[in-house]
Amino acid sequence: QVQLVESGGGLVQAGGSLRLSCAASGRTSSIYAMGWFRQAPGKEREFVADVIRNSGATDYADFVKGRFTISRDIAKNTVTLQMNSLKPEDTAVYYCAARITWINKYDYWGQGAQVTVSS
């Protein structure tokens, strides 16, 4: 089992920046990739970004490319999402997730962190 705990988030004005962090514990050696998803009110959860634990390879949703950066620290078992140039439409609950295989299906989820961007 893997446990994920998010931190960060909060309220920021449009154009501002926020950082989300996710700490993994438990069987962290089984993690293949970690990522971030988000869910806005009345909308489905959507993929934001992920990073392969060993290689560091990253993937981003088109709507965050150039604004968000995901990174991982293997020694600390953490993944960070740096969010710049935030827009009101980025407002959502952001969830950290982890998967143990290359199959794009996430096995573990954090409790979520609220990000609110005011206009």
Image (tube, rainbow, N blue to C red):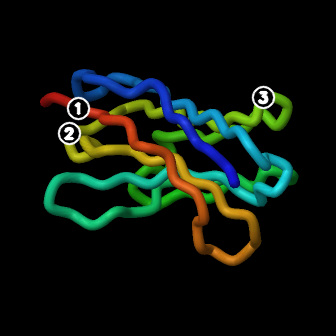
| Mark 3 residue crowding within 10 angstroms, few (<14) / some (14–19) / many (20+) | few
Q: Residue at x 85, y 31 (%)?
A: 75
Q: Which mark is residue 88?
A: 2
Q: Quadrant of the N terminus?
A: bottom right
Would you say 65 lies left or right of 116 here?
right
Q: Earlier in the sequence, mark 2 or mark 3?
A: 3
Residue that carries the numbered disc 1 in the rendered image: 117
Q: Position of residue 95 (x, y in %)?
A: 44, 48
Would you say 108 lies left or right of 1 here?
left
Gap in angstroms between the C-alphas marked 2 and 1: 5 Å
Q: Residue at x 50, y 40 (%)?
A: 68
Circle 2: residue type: Pro
Label count reads: 3
Gap in angstroms between the C-alphas marked 1 and 3: 29 Å
- SS for dot 1: strand
Circle 1: residue type: Val
Position of residue 89 relative to residue 33, above or below, is: above
Q: Position of residue 29 (x, y in %)?
A: 85, 50
Position of residue 84 relative to residue 27, above or below, is: above
Q: Earlier in the sequence, mark 2 or mark 1?
A: 2
Position of residue 72 relative to residue 37, above or below, is: above
Q: Position of residue 52 (x, y in %)?
A: 75, 56
Q: Which mark is residue 76?
A: 3
Q: Residue at x 75, y 72 (%)?
A: 102
Q: Earlier in the sequence, mark 1 or mark 3?
A: 3
Circle 3: residue type: Lys
- SS for dot 2: helix
Of 119 and 55, nearer the camera is 55
Name of the residue lying farthest toward the bottom: 103
